[in-house]
Image (cartoon, rainbow, N blue to C red):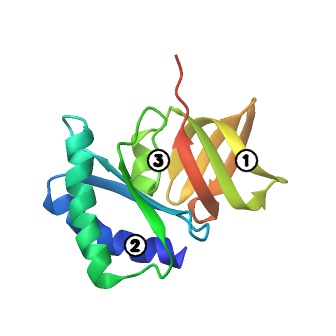
Amino acid sequence: MAKVDQLTDMLRPAAEALGYEFLGVEYIPQGKHSILRIYIDHENGINVDDCASVSHQASGVLEVEDPIASQYTLEVSSPGLERPLFTLEHFKKFVGSKVNLRCHVGVNGRRKFKGELSAVEDELLIVNVDNETFEIDFGDVDGAHLVAEF
């Protein structure tokens, strides 16, 4: 997690300086096929030119700072319908929505949850899954995103 925090601190200012909301970073280390993905948003939406602008800025920062020793592919993306949730503020914004989350430790014998995010209390996420309520510590969440419902 330290690498993601380092990358977030490094890349957030580059995206925000261009007027975008910096949502978060995913770093997937896979040797020569590693991926560094930056998620951005804007009140007017995100298009390819927006992604290219942030990619250009982020590339400059990454070139100077060189935080990843191996080869990787840089991707800049809009959050899409199944937007990732990175911060407590993201979770608070989407209370009442269906979420899919994964924990790095077990909570009541399970690590994966798909259900309604009914509340956020301090650093506790309250998720209803199949008529059962789970209290999940935000610090235990390994990854989360909204579930698109049509």
Tell me which label, 1 or 2, sits earlier in the chain.
2
Amino acid of disc 3: Phe
Point out which mark residue 7 bears. Answer: 2
Mark 1 and mark 3 residues within 8 Å of each other at the beta carbon = no
Q: Tell me: residue 142, above or below residue 82.
A: below
Disc 3 is placed on an element classified as helix
Q: Which residue is mark 3?
A: 91
Rendering coords of residue 150 (x, y %): 52, 16
Q: Is residue 45 left or right of residue 120?
A: left
The residue at 49%/72% (across/down) is 71
Depth-wise, is mark 1 or mark 2 nearer the camera?
Answer: 2
Position of residue 10 relative to residue 98, above or below, is below
Amino acid type, callout 1: Lys
Residue 48 circle label: none
**Which circle marks residue 112 in the picture?**
1
53 to 42, vertically: above or below: below
Mark 2 and mark 3 in contact? Answer it, CB < 8 Å: no
Instruction: Assess disc 3: are there few (<14), some (14-19) or many (≥20) residues with their C-alpha within 10 Å of its C-alpha.
Output: many
Question: Residue at left 54%, top 22%?
Answer: 149
Based on the displayed image, in which of its 4 quarters is residue 79 positioned? top left
Distance in Å between CA atoms under marks 1 and 3: 16 Å
Instruction: Look at 58% across and 54% down and name the residue there.
Output: 143
